[in-house]
Amino acid sequence: MLLNLCLLLTCTFLLSLTYRDWPVRRHWPDHALRLLLSAGTAAVLMHYAVEVGPYKIDLRYVPIALVTLRYGLGAGALVALPTVAWRLLESQLGGLVALVNTLTVLGAASLLRPTLDLAHANLRDLWKLPLPYLGVGLPLLFLPESRALGLVVYPGMLALHSVATVLVLGVLQARLRLLRLANDLRQQVMTDDLTGLGNRRRFDEALARLEVGDHLVLLDVDDFRQLTDKHGPEAGERALRYVGQVLHDAAPGCGFRLGHEAFALLLNLPEPDARAVVARVQAQLTDPGSAAPWACLTVSAGLASRLLREQPAQLVHRADEALYVAKTNGGNRLVTLDDLPRRAAPAPVPDLRPRYSLWQAQRTTVELLAQRRPCGTRTGRNCCSWRSPPSAGWAAAA
């Protein structure tokens, strides 16, 4: 039975690796894989069982009970079906005992399922864990030829199944706890401490996954330096925290803080709806609801839509151009690239290529040198003679 317990824990560890994210997503391929691994675990445990006459003593009912508690009666029946069919083919008497044991496990686990949450099981739930196995080995007590064996085996099987269930739950909960801690750490790394929005690292990841047609909105608080100079850095921090809260309320999960007073929104909305979100943000920030220094803030915004095969840096550059236009035109406005005037097309660049290539120039030079006349002829002497020009004095005398 020690080998059976080691195999059970090994298969449980392999099954725990199918949990890769926190919170656990309801993804049917992952559920199907876990059911398949659970059925394989039950088959492996039955294959390496301890044989006592026509009966087999193993821990194959542990994955059946846990799957029933987690996913319901139907999933537990699917996991138990291969082992029951296999056992019926091996031995009629052993198969009937295995069938009765399986039905009692499925029935008890189904009745216990509403009161036992495996994902949040604690020490107060330990007394419930042996309940699904109360019927395992019970048929042996009613068969005259195996009653003595049942009196010995039944208490040990009940205790062993209970201990194995505690160990299996410990392995699974350790995996889930590790995923939860990793997710918490990732959230801390990806979250801005002051505003609670996503930071620049999370923005870069989300921007890389932005679909074509989605929108990037860059926002910048107007005259923020004057606010901090007049009311101090604490007022500036409270103003930034207020801006972050407004962005979170307007677009939950879509707001990011990129710099000191620079923010961003990634919106999977039609452009009119994206404009409406920015308008709500600006209206709420400019609403003088109280006498606080941050009660009447203005923000400038630049909007750009993701184009086909556009790199994230190019999208940010276009949104930043729109934001620059909004800032330089008084602020407290939203500007998109469609609002900007069209630039005149650049004049065509003249063709500056040489008329002749280097080879043509060399060939022409060689031909001219070949046609040169020698200086021995009369025409050649006239061409080669050199006469100095008349001096200035001779020119004056003439």
Image (cartoon, rainbow, N blue to C red):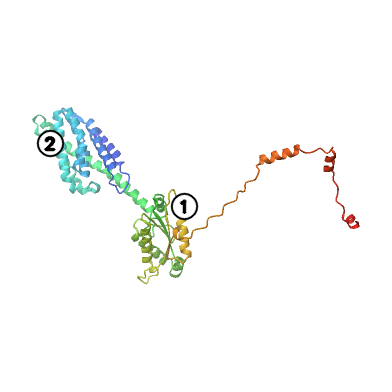
Q: Earlier in the sequence, mark 2 or mark 1?
A: 2
Q: Is residue 131 visible?
A: no
Give whichever of 132, 236 is nearer the camera. Answer: 236
Image position, residue 73 (x, y; %): 18, 42
Q: Would you place residue 23 above or below residue 279 in this image?
A: above
Q: Quadrant of residue 354?
A: top right
Residue drawn at x 24%, y 36% as measured from the top left: 39
Q: Quadrant of residue 78?
A: top left
Q: Would you place residue 174 above or below residue 41 in this image?
A: below
Q: Would you place residue 391 above or below residue 297 in this image?
A: above
Mark 1 falls on what kind of element?
A: helix
Mark 2 to mark 1 CA distance (whole Å): 71 Å
Image position, residue 322 (x, y; %): 46, 59
Residue drawn at x 70%, y 40% as measured from the top left: 364
Task: Estimate how packed mark 1 is, as few (under 14), some (14 to 19) or many (20 or more) residues with alpha carbons within 10 Å.
Answer: few
Task: Estimate how packed mark 2 is, as few (under 14), some (14 to 19) or many (20 or more) residues with alpha carbons within 10 Å.
Answer: many
Q: Quadrant of the C terminus?
A: bottom right
Say which of marks 2 and 1 sits in front: 1
Q: Residue furthest right?
A: 397
Total number of numbered discs in the rendering:
2
Q: Does residue 288 appear to the left or right of 10 in the view shown?
A: right
Q: Amino acid at mark 1?
A: Gln
Image position, residue 82 (x, y; %): 21, 33
Q: Does residue 143 appear to the left or right of 157 in the view shown?
A: left
- Mark drawn on residue 314: 1
Mark 2 falls on what kind of element?
A: helix
Residue holding disc 2:
138
